[in-house]
Amino acid sequence: MEKKLLLIGGVFLGLLLIGGGVFLWRQEKTEKVVGRPDVPEQQQRGPLVTPPPAEETVYETFTTTDGWFSFEYPTAWIRADIKNLESILPRDFIDKYELTMPLILYDPRGAQISCSVYHFAQGQDLNAVMDAFKADLVAMGQPYNEVSRQMVGDVLQVDSTVTVSGTTINVRDLLFLAAGELKETVYDISFTAPQSFWDANRSIFDHLQDSAQLSR
């Protein structure tokens, strides 16, 4: 079932944080599962569900288990249950940041929303955190194109693109920093969609961005 989820929606489920580089790490294994890597996945699998128009979208609140971070997400989107993060990410990357991924959502057209939680040594700011992610991607041989990076209030907003099989993917990461007694906790919401579908999802992404709250 996990492999099936990784393939639905043009295999964009693998586009997690860090500008889609994680997807590229997984792509080779994914193509071996798909019988026809030369044919776009969206042509191999038809949409399972058609989400309602953005203006009719119903939202529900998601809160992390520690209770510090919350945001609203579209209830019509499909929730993925990834039992083993090693199926999509390197083990040393997971261990390095004590990474958990409590929520991954997608629609059949290839858009995705994910929430990731990382832990860093004290004293790191969000720009240092993003620089660390970029260095990890370079080390994995998966660089990407960072288009812009800016602080929006206390949130670091990073817009990136990555090209997969000739398709340009837009990625927006929102990073939130919560200081802890031993480590800093970083919450990331990542929005991902093919560039051709980005505007169709913009109001949903904007709603999530506006609703996100850090209580610590």
Image: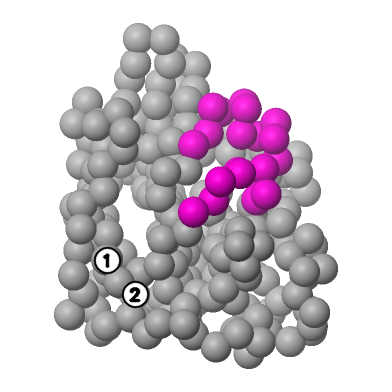
* Residue 201 to residue 213: above or below: below
3 or 92, which lies in front? 3
Q: Closest to the observer: 163 or 112? A: 112
The residue at the point 34 percent across, 16 percent down is: 180
Q: Quadrant of residue 176?
A: top left
- For disc 1, the marked residue is 75
Q: Which residue is at a point 82% across and 68% down the rendered structure image?
A: 32
The CA distance from mark 2 to mark 1 is 14 Å
At a point 47% along the width and 78% down the height, the residue shown is 108
As helix, strand or loop, the secondary structure at mark 1 comes to loop
Residue 46 in which image quadrant = bottom right
Q: Secondary structure at mark 2?
A: helix
Q: Quadrant of the N terminus?
A: bottom right
Of the numbered discs 2 and 1, the one sitting upstream in the chain is 1
- Is 41 a magenta residue? no
* Percent x, y of residue 97: 56, 28
Give above or below for 11 relative to 25: below
Q: Looking at the picture, which amino acid does disc 2 mark?
A: Asn
Image: magenta residue range: 81-100
| Front residue (pair 93, 2) | 2
Percent coordinates x, y for residue 207 in the rendering: 22, 62
Q: Position of residue 141 (x, y in %)?
A: 77, 48
Residue 99 among magenta residues: yes
At 30% across and 28% down in the image, what residue appears?
66
- Return the residue found at the far top: 181
Q: For the residues carrying marks 2 and 1, which lies nearer the camera in this image? A: 1
**The quadrant where residue 9 appears:** bottom right
Q: Residue furthest front?
A: 1
| Display coloring | one colour
Q: Is residue 43 above or below residue 187?
A: below
Task: Say which amino acid is labelled 1.
Answer: Thr
The residue where tag 2 is placed is 201
